[in-house]
Amino acid sequence: MLRGSIVALITPMDAEGGIDDASLKRLVDFHVAAGTQAIVSVGTTGESATLDETEHCQVIARTVELAAGRVPVIAGTGANSTREAITLTRCAKEAGADAALLVTPYYNKPTQEGLYLHHRAVAEAVDIPQILYNVPGRTACDMLPETAGRLSEIENIVGLKEASGDLKRVAILRAACGEGFALYSGDDATTCDFLLLGGDGVISVTANLAPRLMQAMCQAALAGDRAGARALDQRLAALHRDLFVQSNPIPVKWGAVALGLCGIGIRLPLTWLSEQHHTRVRAALEQAGVL
């Protein structure tokens, strides 16, 4: 089981929106050096919604190649079509990814039984460890703990990224899914408490810009060092908040440029960070001690 800080990696792009391979290599090396526990390639933060299927598979494969076994790679392969999710998950397995992360089907609002059947179908079709991803604020679909519990009984469904921000769910999910099932926070602002309550790690936006500090906070929390974890998390608090001042990944991409990690590039319908927010995000970077 992976424990600690896992980065939801941005997909670096050039000014025309093409994939920036040189910056992708820089980012992978940056996270290996920083002690990030794993990389999620082409998740929500990686602009999965605007990459076509060929690009999606290519970025996953290239990330695996660049990681070269130094850090596990988890491929974002969720879709609101079960067939598409199976296709993307097969691409991830063929590329050598260590696991897949599958967001709940968005927009079409499946029932809880539909969610169960969707994820079971993907798990049965592709023999790769799979992590569920519940982010109701973006998908308009909430996977309830009892559904996660049913899915945890499937051998290759090994964890859940829970991004509801509802800390009461940690204990409920642990009871429903068992001790051997990984529980990851998908909400940076509540991650410290999530871990202190028994979670295993975080799949993080903040870790794109402050990976060492995020990993240190996670390790302190996992060790039960409440005071130490909270002190470290306080330094990260402004990033947790201000990386969502506009839709993710708009602010975090601006921050990556400010740190010299990549060039300016994002795809429509997302636009570059509005100038009125630059000072705020820069101040958050300074508070975390990374700028």
Image: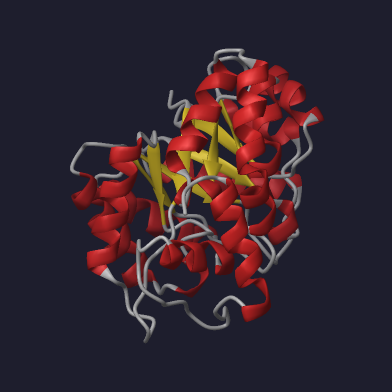
Q: Quadrant of residue 185?
A: top right
Residue 160: horizontal and vertical position, in percent?
58, 35
Depth check, front residue: 31 or 201: 31
**132 and 215: which one is in front?**
215
183 on left or right of 136 = left
Q: Quadrant of the N terminus?
A: top left
Residue 236, located in which quarter of the rendered image?
Answer: top right
Q: Is residue 256 left or right of residue 109?
A: left
Total numbered badges shown on the rendered structure: 0
Residue 72 picture location, percent across and down: 32, 37
Can you see residue 118? yes
The vertical placement of 176 against 169, above or below, is above
Q: Position of residue 17 (x, y in %)?
A: 39, 81
The residue sitting at the bottom extreme is 16
Residue at image location 57% in from the left, 62% down from the top? 282
What colouring method underlies this structural image? secondary structure
